[in-house]
Image (tube, helix red, strand yellow):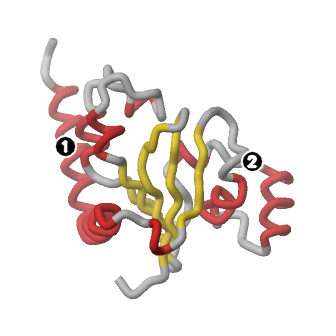
């Protein structure tokens, strides 16, 4: 991993949800904190991460990785259209550089989610290992999750 990386700490109602890492090559990786993932009374970050969602544990077990844009849960918090263009122009970034836009707007997002940029010395060691694992295993992980979900859907109730 020779790419430069920026890390944001994501909180929801003051509780750490996880860490979002954005690489210079456009790869974005969200890893959930163990405390958030294992809390059965956690706040709703997304409907698919709610404790009663059938596969929430499986979906949060591995980091979420995307290229260029952020996961829709985070992307949908950002402005659209001309407002996004205005923000991107002010930051001198492309409108699809969502990590940079999220970092800039991180304390002024809709709802209770806050994204705080971290200095390199503030990034927990566990986050670095999670990010490394996600960069190497993402395609295999997605196939496993979708296969598991598809097999459960095919099972008669």
Task: Classify mark 2: residues with Cα within 10 Å, few (<14), some (14-19) or many (20+).
Answer: some
Q: CA distance from mark 2 to mark 1?
A: 34 Å
101 left or right of 32 in image: right
Q: Helix or strand or loop: what does disc 1 sit on?
A: helix
State which quarter of the image contains the C terminus: top left
Position in image of residue 74 (x %, y %): 56, 47
The residue identified by callout 2 is 79
- Foreground residue, 60 or 145? 60
Q: Is residue 152 left or right of residue 93?
A: left
Q: Is 137 in front, or is 7?
A: 7
Number of marks in picture: 2
Q: Residue 114 location, x and y as percent?
A: 60, 45
Q: Where in the figure is residue 62, as x and y percent of width and height?
A: 27, 51
Q: Quadrant of residue 111?
A: top right
Residue ID at (36%, 48%) = 32
Q: Secondary structure at mark 2?
A: loop
Tell me the mark number nearer the camera, choosing from 2 and 1. 2
Taking depth in this image into account, of 149 and 83 the one nearest to the observer is 83
* Few, some or many residues within 10 Å of mark 1 (<14, 14–19, 20+): few
Q: Earlier in the sequence, mark 2 or mark 1?
A: 2
Task: Check disc 1 and report the residue beneath it.
Answer: 147
Q: Residue at x 26, y 25 (%)?
A: 54
Q: Nearer the viewer, residue 132 or 143?
A: 132
Which residue is located at x 73 percent, y 72 percent? 93
Q: Which mark is residue 75?
A: none
Q: Residue furthest front?
A: 121
Q: Residue most toward the top?
A: 157
Position of residue 91 in the picture relative to residue 4 (left or right): right
Q: Is residue 156 above or below residue 62?
A: above
Residue beneath the point at 48% across and 74% down: 120
Residue 105 vertical position relative to residue 60 in the rendered view, above or below: below
């Amino acid at each position: 991993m020779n790419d430069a990386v920026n890390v944001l700490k994501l909180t929801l109602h003051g509780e750490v949800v996880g860490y979002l890492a954005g690489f210079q090559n456009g790869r974005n990786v969200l890893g959930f904190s163990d405390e958030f993932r294992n809390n059965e009374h956690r706040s709703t970050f997304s409907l698919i991460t709610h404790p009663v969602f059938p596969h929430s544990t499986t979906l949060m077990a591995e980091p979420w990785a995307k290229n260029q844009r952020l996961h829709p849960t985070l992307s949908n918090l950002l402005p659209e259209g001309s407002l996004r263009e205005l923000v991107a122009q002010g930051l001198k970034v492309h409108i699809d550089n969502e990590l940079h836009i999220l970092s800039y707007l991180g304390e002024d997002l809709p709802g209770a989610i806050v994204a705080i940029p971290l200095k390199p010395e503030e990034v927990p060691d566990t986050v670095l290992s999670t990010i490394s694992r996600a960069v190497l295993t993402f395609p295999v992980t997605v196939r496993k999750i979708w296969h598991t979900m598809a097999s459960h859907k095919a099972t008669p109730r």
